[in-house]
Image: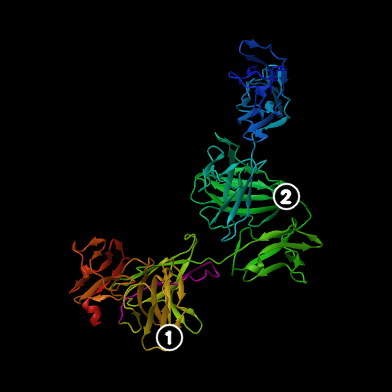
Amino acid sequence: MRCEIQGGEGKVWKYEWTAPNTNSPPTSSEYRISRVSVSHSGDYRCRGSSDYLLTGWSDAIRLTVSCDKPTVTLQPSWTQIYSGETVTVRCEIQGGEGAQWTYEWRAAKLNTPPTSNEYRIIRATESDSGGYSCRGRRDYFFSEWSDIITLTVSYEPRPVLTVSPSWLSPGASVTLNCEVEHPSAGWSFYWYKAVPDLSEKSSSYELLPDGSGTAQDSYIIHGQTHTAGYVCRAGRGDPEYHTDHSQPKFVWSADVHSAESLTVSPDRVQHFTSDSVSLTCEGNFPEWRVRKFSEDGRLSDCRRMTGSTCDINTSKSDTAVYWCESGSGEFSSAVNITVQNDGDGPILVSPVHPVTEGASVSLSCSLRTQKILSNVFFYHNDKLIQNDPRGELKISAVSKSDEGFYKCQYSGRESAQSWMSVKDKPRPVLTVSPSWLSPGASVTLNCEVKHPSAGWSFYWYKAVRNLSEKSSSYELLPDGSGTAQDSYIIHGQTHTAGYVCRAGRGDPEYHTDHSRPKFVWSADVHSAASLTVSPDRVQHFTSVSLTCEGNFTEWRVRKFSEDGRLSDCRRMTGSTCNIHTSKSDTAVYWCESGSGEFSSAVNITVQNDGNGPILVSPVHPVTQGASVSLSCSLRTQKILSNVFFYHNDKRIQNDPRGELKISAVSKSDEGFYKCQYSGRESAQSWMSVKGEQDQNI
């Protein structure tokens, strides 16, 4: 703005201004506002003075500065919130900075709206739902009304949990998904296992590992083997607002050999209406309840419990999955029950529990009025099995390909279809103690089958290698057939050997798979077959050669790694295995001949730290009375001085040296050794000491 005095040319004028929002107006003829704001709105006048001359005030010029339309914002920015959450509604006027505003609000619930730019809703209710808008007022100036922002307040949400798969299969992981309305609105998720509480007729919730406040709406469970229930909930905001817990969802296991199991009488999947069916919980628990998950997704408890047995007079609504829950929070196996609602139609008589591979099974068809039928057609996964009708379908040795849906047809009428599950043959786990032989010690084998109380007998074998077939044959050990005990003791074992076991039960007897082989190792280098190592030490940096020696033409070198894996040498040249060492080559090694003989065994340790030292120690046992020398070596320097040596983690001497010499070894020298150079330690290795009598033998 410029102040001009007509006729005042030639005089030196000084100027005065009246202006809003300023205490020190300029004295020049120009009044410049560099960043105009609403606060500059108002009347501007000027006058001039020169010597003793003072002009009158000019007419006023009114400057009007308008601001942007106000905006209503929410913090947090969610327009959909839930009962109990807190939200702040804020009015923002762009370009209105510096002005002293009062605010007006339009809101459904506000009888006495605030005059500040914020409106805080604490513990929102549904009545807070509606449109919010605002405007600003300064003196006599009003901004426009903002656009309306709509806030929706709903009842406390309950997330929906889904579980996939619903039925467990061996090795499969279980995925939980937790869905909340408006999933993009900043939710974190909490994952729980449902633990039954029979006294309260409810469940408590245990947080799953790393299941607190995950950003992802899914959670994966590995290694689940038995029936279990899960719930989830979600939270957001600060302080955090939590939803209800979801309804529980379940993953079911049909494994009847869990510590808790459910038996069904009559023992079949399908039943007629008004049949009496008993579901009995079995296991070492005094309290039980039977739970039911119906086709329509409803979860309920058995209404007629007598002790550990639930009695049902079947109706169509009883078609469901059933399982037991104990007073201590354990779940049983689960079963499907299907009720035939057509009084004149047939039912399929099929096993309610999974059938084990290799076992026999018989399926039949039945009417309410006639239990045994002939002229029946059977279907597997909707395909007719044979064109000729029969009285029953017999499978003498079930395989995985027999798993699936079955139904029967009689006189043109079909039964419902039921799933027959086939489970893998159980494989027992063999343990051998001790793993390394010592003179005069016996070797104990233990064969563990899941659910050992289930009437198993045990069979014990020696593993004899067949190099041409790259496999093993199994020779029954003396008195090793069908023992009632799950352990077997071997006396007088002097050399490396491999063993397996298996179990059987029933009449005719059903057998498990053979266990994986386990070994007892001998370090005796004077057996008929032996293994030499070059360089002749336990610890190594780079390549190693393992050579089998003995009067045999065929050899292979076997390796048992730290992680329990058994493998063959991949680079055999004649009787020598060549290894370019890596960390995975730390293992026990031994030779097996074409005629089934085992050599002595050796430990090999690979130094994975390229700058660290290794201990140079004998790979085979040292004889009592013999001398031995231990030293320390680097990859770049074979001979070191200033080395400290440790025996069973105790420093041997306080003064460093180049090597540790033992002139006459005794049994007390046996144990773990390691060396230390420039503050860095080697791995530790076992030095074995054998008696002179072992040498003579």
Residue numbers of the magenta segment: 501-525
Residue type of the residue flagged with mark 2: Thr
Location of residue 49 in the rendering, given as x and y in whole percent from the top left corner: 63, 14
Q: Residue furthest front?
A: 10
Q: Residue 595 carries which label?
A: 1
Of residues 139 and 363, the one drawn nearer to the viewer in this rendering: 139
Of residues 631 and 374, the one drawn nearer to the viewer in this rendering: 631
- Dot 1, how many residues are within 10 Å of its Cα: few (below 14), some (14-19), or many (20+)? some
Q: Are marks 1 and 2 in contact (CB under 8 Å)?
A: no
Location of residue 686 in the rendering, given as x and y in whole percent from the top left corner: 30, 69
Location of residue 631 in the rendering, given as x and y in whole percent from the top left corner: 25, 71
* Residue visible at 70% across and 67% down in the picture: 392
Q: Which mark is residue 273?
A: 2
Location of residue 674 in the rendering, given as x and y in whole percent from the top left corner: 28, 66
| Quadrant in the rendering for residue 187 | top right
| Quadrant in the rendering for residue 499 | bottom left
Is residue 251 something that shows in the picture? no
Under circle 2, the secondary element is: loop
For the C terminus, give its image quadrant. bottom left
**CA distance for labels 1 and 2:** 66 Å
Compared with residue 526, is residue 235 higher up or lower down, i.e. above or below? above
Residue type of the residue flagged with mark 1: Ser
Is residue 176 something that shows in the picture? yes
| Quadrant in the rendering for residue 78 | top right
For the N terminus, give its image quadrant. top right
